[in-house]
Amino acid sequence: MSVDIKREILRLLREDEEFRYAVAGMIGLDEILKRLDRHEEELVKLREDMIELRKDMIDLREDMNRLRKDMMLGFERMDRHLSALGARWGLVAEEAFREGLKGFLEKELKLRVERWGERDEEWVVYGYPSVVEIDLSISDEKITLIEVSSHIRPSDVLLFVRKAQFYWKVTGRKPDRLLIVTPYAEDGAFKTAREYGVEIYTKV
């Protein structure tokens, strides 16, 4: 650019207000356009990052769903194992308890306890074909049927009565005495026992 042109531009900048505004506007517009270009690039990058983040969130949600499903299956298997273990332990504990009380009966009540069993094909006791077992004691030709349990409910009394009826039907010998031995019997169990002539012995 020549010296004369520079001088003319400087003069116009000093003396011509419109010229100054025009130059300032051109400079400002150029800067604004540059900034807009930069912002547009940043917006494009931000949009790409958001799309990538959304994909990651979808993948994470799918992973969480799979993990939740696996955990639920694991908990269900654990619950089944614990239930089976608890049931098995309950049967073992009940049987050990029964054996202990049988010893008590022989020692304290002088009752020699034996195990009697027969298959019930007519569904008398349980409502389906099954082997019915019951403890009994024979003394002076008198038959005492005995139920030994750690806990007696009214339904247990009724089941014991059905066992006694089944024994009578199979052997043709009516039991002389029905005796339940337990450390704990519900109030309703005592009422049911009185109605069916069953004795509940709890002094153990």
Image (cartoon, rainbow, N blue to C red):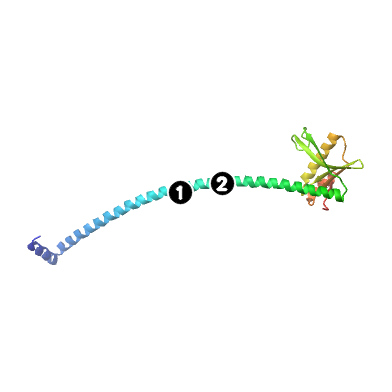
Q: Residues within 10 Å of mark 1 (few under 14, many from 20)?
A: few
Q: Residue at 29% of width from left, 53% of height from top? A: 41
Q: Residues within 10 Å of mark 2 (few under 14, many from 20)?
A: few
Q: Position of residue 49 (x, y in %)?
A: 36, 51
- Badge 2 element: helix
**Left-right relation of 134 to 90:** right
Identify the residue under disc 2: 72
Identify the residue under disc 1: 60
User: Is residue 125 or residue 118 the one in the foreground?
Assistant: 118
Amino acid beneath label 2: Met
User: Is residue 161 or residue 109 the one in the foreground?
Assistant: 109
Amino acid beneath label 1: Leu
Q: Quadrant of the N terminus?
A: bottom left
The correct choice, above or below, for 17 with respect to 168 in the image is below
Q: Residue at 85% of width from left, 36% of height from top? A: 168
- Mark pair 1, 2: CA separation: 18 Å
- Badge 1 element: helix
> Is residue 190 visible to us here?
no
Most extreme residue toward the right is 140
Q: Position of residue 36 (x, y in %)?
A: 27, 55
Q: Residue at 78% of width from left, 38% of height from top? A: 132
